[in-house]
Image: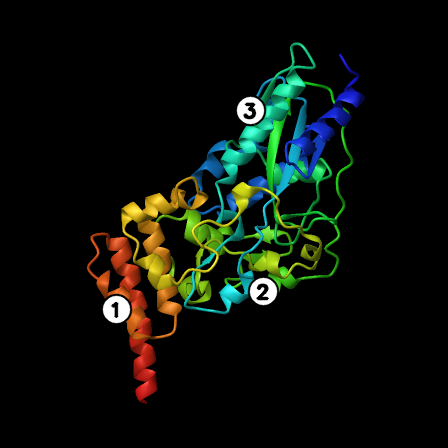
Amino acid sequence: MPSFTQLADDIRAWSRELGFQQVGITDVTIAQDEERLMQWLEQGRHGEMDYMQRHGRRRARPQELVPGTIRLISARMDYLPPETLPPEDVLEKPELGYISRYALGRDYHKVMRKRLAQLAERIQGQVAGSTYRVFVDSGPVLEKAFARQAGLGWIGKHTNVINSRAGSWFFLGEILTNLPLPTDEPASDHCGTCRACIDVCPTRAIVAPYELDATRCISYLTIEMRGSIPVEFRKPMGNRIYGCDDCQLVCPWNKFARLTVEADFKARHGLDGVTLVSLFGWNEEEFLKRTEGSAIRRIGYECWLRNIAVALGNAPTTETVLTALQARANHPSPLVREHVHWALEQHQMVAAGDEI
């Protein structure tokens, strides 16, 4: 059996072979982050994400989640896809649908979980009696705090993890283990006086530095929430139909971001810049087919139409847009109908304003 110091070095080498850009190792104590989590929950900033409340403090205590855990291996993998329309260009063309860059390719849960399992099995093969469990957004783990403690980056004012040499366009995953591996130094904060992410947020979801009110966040509104999108947020949503990247797009540290080399993360079906009308025209079978293996599928067809209806309400008034909306005006879903009617009202107001 190699020494644990040697094993830690081997883990880093193996992780690179498996396509990870970096791994770090930390113990399982993050008491301050645990208290911040509880305050955030008490303020109701998790919205409909009941699973956040349900697991509560366990998110900061992996040793309770998997008894015997004394170390957490945090890994990151770049996901910014190459050969896509520039995000800014899509956002500036309101007739197109903007999808968060992380969701343009294959579902990262599947890609990273498989690679992490391979890494964990290799570790286990070196130490008899070792145990592990792999997580990729699949369990109650406060992954950003542990990534910081493992030295992968600091948590920025937008609450995403930032790496000084790689920006923030990366996924995180974890391996919980009972091995006493040497730990890495936590990352220090380098946001300084910058507040670009706070100022650019369309819905003012970053209510203070390092504080996100998820109930105002477009990613929450378009992905996590299943009901009616509050009217106050519909205009600010613009053409963002699945997630929002604005806070990352303006972050100066992302000048160091690198495009992914993972074929699985390349954009599929031209979703980096499809017209809203085209997307709104998909029937449920087309939606399921074109989102197969994608993170987008998890919101379901009804919410997909809801989100696009809002974006169409914010699009320029054209016969094509109006025809597309009117075709869904009597949709069987009350949720879809509500948002379609709102969108049509926006265009009616524009028409009335033009006549004055």
Q: Residue at x 57, y 57 (%)?
A: 206
Quarter of the image holding residue 70?
A: top right
Disc number for residue 91: none
Picture coordinates of residue 40, whole percent (x, y)? 55, 45
**The C terminus appears in which quarter of the rendering?**
bottom left
**The N terminus appears in which quarter of the rendering?**
top right
Q: Which of disc 1 and disc 2 is earlier in sequence?
A: 2
Q: Are marks 2 and 1 in contact (CB under 8 Å)?
A: no
SS state under label 3 = helix
Tell me if mark 2 has few (under 14), some (14-19) or many (20+) residues whose alpha carbon lies within 10 angstroms of its own.
Answer: some
Residue 236 visible in the snapshot? yes
- Is 72 placed above or below 234 here? above
Residue extending furthest bottom? 356
- Disc tally is 3
Q: Is residue 155 left or right of residue 312?
A: right
Tell me if mark 3 has few (under 14), some (14-19) or many (20+) residues whose alpha carbon lies within 10 angstroms of its own.
Answer: some
What residue is pinned by disc 3?
A: 65
The amino acid on which the numbered mark 2 sits, given as a three-letter code, is Val
Picture coordinates of residue 151, whole percent (x, y)? 73, 38
Observer-side mark, 2 or 1, equals 1
* Depth check, front residue: 86 or 39: 86
The amino acid on which the numbered mark 3 sits, given as a three-letter code, is Leu
Picture coordinates of residue 351, whole percent (x, y)? 31, 81
Q: Residue at x 70, y 57 (%)?
A: 255
Residue extending furthest top? 128
What residue is pinned by disc 1?
A: 323
* Depth check, front residue: 118 or 209: 118
- Alpha carbons under labels 2 and 1: distance apart: 33 Å
Residue 137 visible in the snapshot? no
